Amino acid sequence: MKKFSFKLIALGAIIFLTTINSCKKILNQTPAGVLAGPTLANKAGVDGLLIGAYSLLDGYYQGQPGSAFASGISNWSWGGVGSDDSYKGSSTGDQRDEGLTAIEQHVSINPTDGYLGSKWQVCYAGIVRANNVIQEVPLVKDGSLTDAAGQAAIAEARFLRGVYHFELAKVWQNVPYVDETVTYAAGNLSVGNGAPIWDKIEADFAAAMTKLPKTQPQAGRANYYAAEAFLAKAYIFDHQYDKALPLLTDCINNGTTASGAHYALEPYANNFNALTKNGPESVFAAQMTVADGSNGQNDDAGDVLNFPGGGTYSGCCGFYTPSYHLANAFKVDANGLPMFQIDGATGFPKYDDVNLGNDHGVGAGTAYTPTAEAVDSRLDWTVGRRGIPYLDWGLGGGEPWTRGDLVPYVPIKNVFYHSAQASTTDTQAGWAGSQGVANNYNIIRFADIYLWRAECYILGTAPNLALAEADVNAVRSRAALPSNWVHTFVDNSDPSKGFTNTPAANYKVGLYTGQFAANGQAYALGALMIERQLEFGMEGQRFFDLQRMDGRFGGKQGTGYMAGVMNAYYKADNRIANPTLGAAKFTAGRDEVYPLPQSQVDIEGGKLKQNPNY
């Protein structure tokens, strides 16, 4: 199936000029060289506008203020570095002044931080482009666009508008909601943020469902089931579990990808491989392409820093390093189950009492044997460890592959395969050789659907812990299959010879056997949360999972929950001195969200309210 192309050709460049005309404030500027309206009032014009709206899903456009490091769709900075998943990485001072250190520490995030503005700008640029589609369709009178096609285009645009607003609401909670009626001509561009916008996001996805087809001619486009899944996700974040439940069940029973493949849990590693993207687990993904003539605009520019800083993989830049805490979370008990219960003596989850064996302090030339401790098999698809195959690059190098912060782990999910380098990478920004990668980012994958439904069964008005356990086990069953494990190389000195059938580590993944019902709701919720951390580690989701469980925003774990988790993580991981993490402290009532960009607050003259305590 042909993949949807997001290449900004001549028409896309025109659209770019009509929608992105201000570094300070996208909405409150006179449009420069506007060519919408009659100029684009035909099918080709609408298609071009729609491509422009899709094209910003990766979080990057040429000439954007700030960098893609902060605005990339993976949310590695906001959802990863800002959580207990990862450290900033690299050397202590790298990206410190830009604000990434503050995001990791949650001590001094300045509302003037350029990272904030980058994310804000890209999301609202996407919203403007989606609104342009909705405004343009009624102007097409030449017969080139059927009514059904026009309504479908509007549905795709409303879907995308919902996605971009969702991104904003996760990072900042209360943000301005901007629909197609907010225009320069109407004089209503100043929009406040006095209340949550979940109801409006939900309305966009619900409307999209009514007109979107169940299949599309290109992979990567939104279909009915993608809209249904996003509507369910919005209800989950809005804590309307009873509304989300039937939508999720329909996705599980009947859902298909845009290409028509029934949703399924495919081999875990396929989700992070450019050669197997858009598979049956991909509910909706930001499409990444390379060597397409766009000069790097369509690759995964947001993650260009997030590669090992040395070793067999010679590259840049050593950012987004997995935390000790995350690696520890993959430890299992004698039954192959997570050790998430809190140890009363330490205040840590039991897996954090002692760090998983690692190579911290072991020199590059010193012989090293990986720990034999039993671990969940997803560990080595999530965390690059010394002595374990690092995709097909060779054995992982551990701490010598990092650039600082005294950590032995490196990211892996966003990394390309050595054997596919020629076809799946390009040079990003003129300096990051082969680090513009064609790996899609799955905004929602089918494993999400199972675990969100489990959440509904745990927290809905009619809890069913047995069914919740079954859904968690559905995800765990894949991790238990030896075919989904990392295996040793046939020849460590020549990875191109392939892999054996021997597991690379002591993998042990068990299923729950009635513990949810036996131990009650609190246990079930703890098991769900650790399952999400294991399944989606290093995918930029952890901060937002903790956030929605906190009582500040209606979560069932009570006010202060997120601060408790984060401060326990800081305490545990600072057992090994970390020059950046050592100053970290998470403050309840402030740090569950990030500060709005101060430039936006100032320019609105009182319409925008800064988040509390910033």
Image (tube, grey):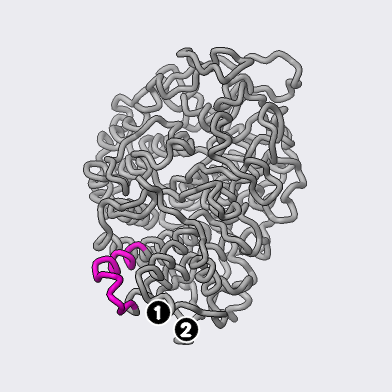
Name the residue type under label 1.
Answer: Thr
**SS type, badge 2:** loop
Q: How many callouts does the rendering have? A: 2
The answer for how far apart the CA atoms under marks 1 and 2 are is 8 Å
355 relative position to 135: left or right: right
Q: In the picture shown, does residue 364 fall above or below 300?
A: above
**SS type, badge 1:** loop
Name the residue type under label 2.
Answer: Asn
Residue 270 is situated, as x and y percent measured from the top left of the image, at: 43, 33
Q: In the picture shown, does residue 536 fall above or below 604?
A: above
Asked whether the residues under the numbered discs 1 and 2 touch, taking CB atoms below 8 Å apart as contact, a structural biologist would say yes
| Residue tagged 2 | 188
Q: In the picture shown, does residue 235 fall above or below 437?
A: below
| Residue tagged 1 | 181
Q: Which residues are magenta?
A: 140-156
- Give whichever of 367, 612 is nearer the camera: 367
Q: Can residue 312 be seen at all in this image of the molecule?
A: yes
Residue 72 is situated, as x and y percent measured from the top left of the image, at: 56, 53
Residue 547 is situated, as x and y percent measured from the top left of the image, at: 48, 51
Q: Quadrant of the N terminus?
A: top left
In magenta segment, residue 20 = no
Residue 391 falls in which quadrant of the image? top right
- Give whichever of 189, 607 is nearer the camera: 189
Q: Earlier in the sequence, mark 1 or mark 2?
A: 1
